[in-house]
Image (cartoon, helix red, strand yellow):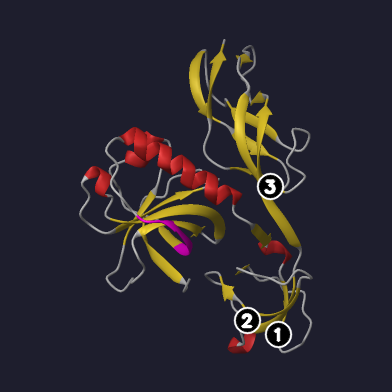
Amino acid sequence: MEKVIIEGVVEHGRRLGRELGFPTANVAVPDSVAAEDGVYRSRAEVDGAVYDAMSNLGRNPSVGGTARRLETHIFGFRGALYGRMLRVELLEKIRDERRFDTLEELRAQIEKDKEYILKADKSFATPASVTVGVDETNTDDKVIALIDKVPSDGFGEYELELSSGMYIPEDNKKVKYKLDIVKKAVAQLELTVQAQNVQSGLTAKINNKLIAQVWGEEGKITTDNVKAYVDVSGLGAGTYNLPVKIEGENVSFAENYTIEVTVE
């Protein structure tokens, strides 16, 4: 499909996505955007960091929406986005927007959309591995670039789309590049969650293991390489529902997870 990029400041919405378990960043859609309404596999950029995402472009008829908006669920992102600039590239339309009779029907369809997107073939180059030479002059400068398709041997010429604040001298965007190609995959892991930064004299108990969908390099997403933890800094005795964080090389959660922790 023809490249479609939508940028805007994240606005407050109805919080329906959060209620359904898929919080979204909502952006008004300019009249100049001619893309068809529907659900898309997408890519979101926040402060120079790039994430896989799924987006709904349209009016959200299931809840009586009227204004055309872009609602994007960003896989692996944790943090507040209200008032911040968001850049979303629509990569592939996966279905039309339609009205669902119940929220449960909508939730079930979103789960199917997520499953399709997470299983989509994604060979990618990690931004830190992109080394470019300008006008056939080798350089060790590293440029963060968004690349849709690359040859299997990792060599060639490509017109790079640079992230905000990056540039190539002489405004020459046709460059030689060498890429470390990584096959990205998602795997379900059963993780033991550890508590970190427990105050002296207290203990933290986590009774349940976490079943999580984890992004990473294909073949390397294992419990040996992935660790999960919660930060209980400053927390006194009590029971808390805390966000789970992840440790490991080039890994991230496919969605946000929380777990119950008892400090005593």
> Can the viewer see residue 74 in this picture?
yes
Magenta segment, prevailing SS (helix, strand or loop): strand
* x and y, in percent, of residue 91 in the image: 50, 64
Counting from the top left corner in percent of width and height, residue 109 is at 41, 42
Side (left or right) of 15 relative to 182: left
Return the disc, 1 or 2, that comes first in the chain's sequence: 1
Q: Residue at x 28, y 46 (%)?
A: 99
Which residue is labeled 3 in the image? 216
Horizontal side, residue 228 vs residue 51: left or right: right
Residue position for label 2: 168
Question: What residue sits 54% from the left and 51% below the top?
Answer: 117
Residue positioned 61% across, 83% down in the render: 173
Report whether 112 appears left or right of 7: right
Residue 191, quarter of picture = top right
Is the C-beta separation of discs 1 and 2 under 8 Å? yes
Using a 10 Å C-alpha cutoff, classify the residue at mark 1 as few (fewer than 14 neighbours), some (14 to 19) or many (20 or more): some
Q: Which residue is mark 1?
A: 134
Residue 57 placement: quadrant: bottom left
Is residue 118 or residue 156 the one in the foreground?
118
Where does the image place residue 24, in percent across and percent down from the top left?
40, 47
- CA gap between label 3 and label 1 equals 31 Å
- Residue 20 on the magenta segment: no
Residues 53 and 77: in front is 53
Q: Tag 2: residue type?
A: Ile
Q: Amino acid at mark 3?
A: Gly
Give yes or no for contact between labels 2 and 3 (Cβ–Cβ under 8 Å): no
